[in-house]
Image (spheres, grey):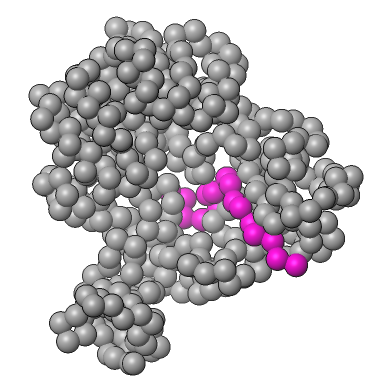
Amino acid sequence: MEFQVEIVRLDDQGRGIGYIDGKIVFVENALPQEVVRVFITKEKKKFYEAKVIERIITSMDRVIPKCIYYETCGGCNLMHLTYCKQLEYKKNKGIQILKKFAGIELKNPDMIASDEFYYRNKVVFHVKDGRLGFYQKESHQFVEIDKCLLVHPTINQLLTELKGATFLKSVEKVMIRTFQDGLKTQIVFYPQENLKEEEIIHRIKDFVTSIYVDNRCIYKNREILEKIGDRNYLVRPESFFQVNTKMTKKLYDEVKEKLEPSKDDIILDLYCGAGTIGLYIAPFVKYVYGVEIVKEAIVSAKKNQEINRTKNIEFYVGDTKTILEKFHLQANKVIVDPPRSGLDQKTKEYLLKLQPHRIIYVSCNPVTLARDIKDLEPKYQFETITFVDMFPNTDHIESVCLLKLI
């Protein structure tokens, strides 16, 4: 079925929203103020999903995507929108979600912008018949690529060097990470069958700092050193590290500013990963306790503690709610950086019991952030929030929120 639709706004996933006989329709790659002819791809009881066949009226905010794979690759979904309007959209998205789910009225929160392209320090390529690429959104339709505009140029250079390598026919996925602005590179091959490791090393040894096959390091360094501010971090393949290195410092500076650290503060750093945030603020406080469920992350955290010669921090491995109950950790300020699912109920109950003066909430999902703010309302009031664009050309938004004890 084909219809003509006027797009009135964008949804949380960056899709255009219009109406067909009063029924909502979500349209990929469509912008507000556009009139488009669409083809219905999915029909549900309460909504349609559709794709554009023709643009009858085109938005002044539309730009031609610089990426030749944009229409087929599922990696990004806002490259057709000017970057200043992407920032505006993301800010409004955060404002609307916090109002809808937490009843918070935001006037003009800060938004920190990023470089628009070549910002990612990490990528995972799928491999099919020895070719490297990505899958289309919500499908297993393979798209071979020669260059990605979101990743650091060093990753694109290595992608070129891998082209035509016969050993790739035995590989399922390839992860590449680069640090120190491209000076150090880590590559991991996830094989479908036995790989000829000598062939891999011979092919790319001049372009990488370490080579892994699954969890085995077969060439040079097991870890790569990255620097954020004056802090050093060792990163292994399984270690979590923010994918936008330049913006990571700005994110951590926001955490520090909202924390208002003093030498009397004892900080609880929950979901601490490899201890990156805790180590970043440790020089400004009395003591930090870091808690993380991933054992390998805590191994990295302790190594990071050692190389930074930081004595006023201690790490615990285990589920957050279990560690809090077992060790009865006390703190007057708390930093939380949970996964997209947000804080679990027992952690929120513990925070309400502990009653730290401040909670700094780093979030990659404004919906679960709003839910958790609401659940902490009996004791905490929302104070301020800063949005940080860690992922340009996508609909994702990071934020740093301050909650204060009432």
Q: Nearer the viewer, residue 90 or 3?
A: 3
Left or right: 347 as drawn, with respect to 148: left
Residue 83, percent from left and from top: 38, 60
Q: What is the magenta range? A: 112-129
Residue 213, percent from left and from top: 75, 43
Height in image: 293 above or below 125? Answer: above
Q: Nearer the viewer, residue 216 or 277?
A: 216
Magenta stretch holds residue 225: no
Height in image: 329 above or below 41? Answer: above
Left or right: 45 as drawn, with respect to 123: left
Residue 102, by quadrant, is top left
Residue 283, percent from left and from top: 42, 13
Q: Nearer the viewer, residue 200 or 263?
A: 200
Residue 400, by quadrant, is top left
Q: Residue at x 33, y 92 (%)?
A: 2
Q: Residue at x 23, y 56 (%)?
A: 92
Q: Quadrant of the N terminus?
A: bottom left
Q: How many marks?
A: 0
Q: Residue at x 82, y 50 (%)?
A: 194
Q: Is residue 278 visible?
A: no
Q: Is residue 264 visible?
A: yes
Magenta stretch holds residue 126: yes
Residue 346, percent from left and from top: 27, 29
Q: Residue at x 26, y 49 (%)?
A: 367
Q: Nearer the viewer, residue 318 or 225?
A: 318
Left or right: 207 as drawn, with respect to 268: right
Q: Quadrant of the C terminus?
A: top left
